[in-house]
Image (cartoon, rainbow, N blue to C red):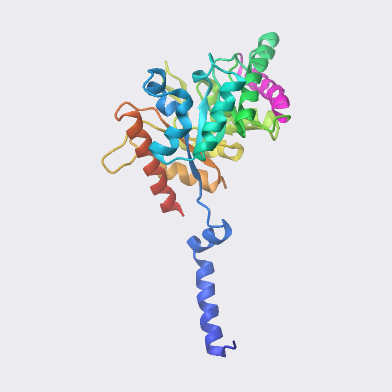
Amino acid sequence: MSINRRQFIAQSAFAGAALASPSFAKKVFAGDKPLFKISLAQWSLNRAFFGGDLDVPDFARIAREKFGIGAIEYVNQFYAETLSDSLLADLRQRAADQGVESLLIMIDGEGKLGDPDQEARMRAVANHHRWADAAHALGCHSIRVNASSAGSWEEQMKLAADGLNRLAGYCENLGLNVLVENHGGLSSNAEWLTGVMKLADNPRVGTLPDFGNFIIDRETGESYDRYRGMAELMPFAKAVSAKSYGFDEQGNETTMDYARILKIVADAGYRGWVGIEYEGDAHSEEDGIVKTKQLLERVRSDLA
């Protein structure tokens, strides 16, 4: 089919206008994929799981059927007494049955990876191995750890980097990443944690920036600016945690600006999973999850 000069100019002008449109460009060059995908952290339901109101191994079904979420983040505390090959096989099958992706395991209570005592530090690294094995068995891409240490700013940075690299050496063979969350102490100081990342200088070591965990010292109230912190941690991020506490009548989170934070996440080029982690008391756990999901979806749409 041939077109005349006037039709050619008109079609060219339309195409040029479309390509100049930010929303069109994002859809074309992102393959029409969302800016980020939404997952669910098991800790969002910690009261229900600890209280026995929900069955821990049923997490994948709950995520899918109750909340329409297709990816989950496990918490090791719920499996510490029952971890076994048979349990892992069961969890993997349950997730597969629901079409739910297992992303990572959040690990706590296994020692300080930056312990100044070398023997204790090596023991902490070894304690994480069983959870790395579990994450691998579940098909996860990462484990989330803490960078606890003691000593001066510089000493803690070096010790944490050492422990993380040693653990990453084990995880390398499993195809896993080792992610540090801002989770209290110096890890909630993004300047310090980015220093650890640079010192570790390991492609298997990264961050899991949490929207809410920027309180450095709960006793003194010392905290780090969350927006600055998110911007500093995002270049190293391989997962993101959408912490939430409460919502107003318009559905906005009352303690932080989700739109501002998620723009920081998007501007960093991150296109992975953002995990819901509701920790509030103003709403039930289930309502808090639903409200967080709705807010994430709304802001994602506004940013697209």
Q: Residue at x 28, y 44 (%)?
A: 250
What percent of the width, then of the height, locates residue 45? 40, 27
Residue 211 highlighted magenta (yes or no): no
The residue furthest bottom is 4
In which image quadrant can residue 257 be found?
A: top left
Q: How many marks?
A: 0
Q: Nearer the viewer, residue 227 or 258?
A: 258
Residue 253 picture quarter:
top left
Query: Which quarter of the rendered picture does the N terminus lie within?
Result: bottom right
Report if residue 155 lies within the magenta region: yes
Residue 161 lies, in percent from the top left, at 67, 24
Does residue 199 show up?
yes
**Residue farthest to the left?**
249
Q: Residue at x 55, y 32 (%)?
A: 93
Q: With 8 as the anchor, is 44 left or right in this view? A: left
Quadrant position of residue 92: top right
Can residue 255 be seen at all in this image of the molecule?
no
Q: 162 above or below 37? A: above
Between 257 and 152, the residue placed more toward the observer is 257
Instruction: Give percent across and percent down for residue 76.
Output: 53, 21
Q: Position of residue 7 (x, y in %)?
A: 53, 86
Figure check: 116 above or below 250: above
Q: Which residues are magenta?
A: 151-172
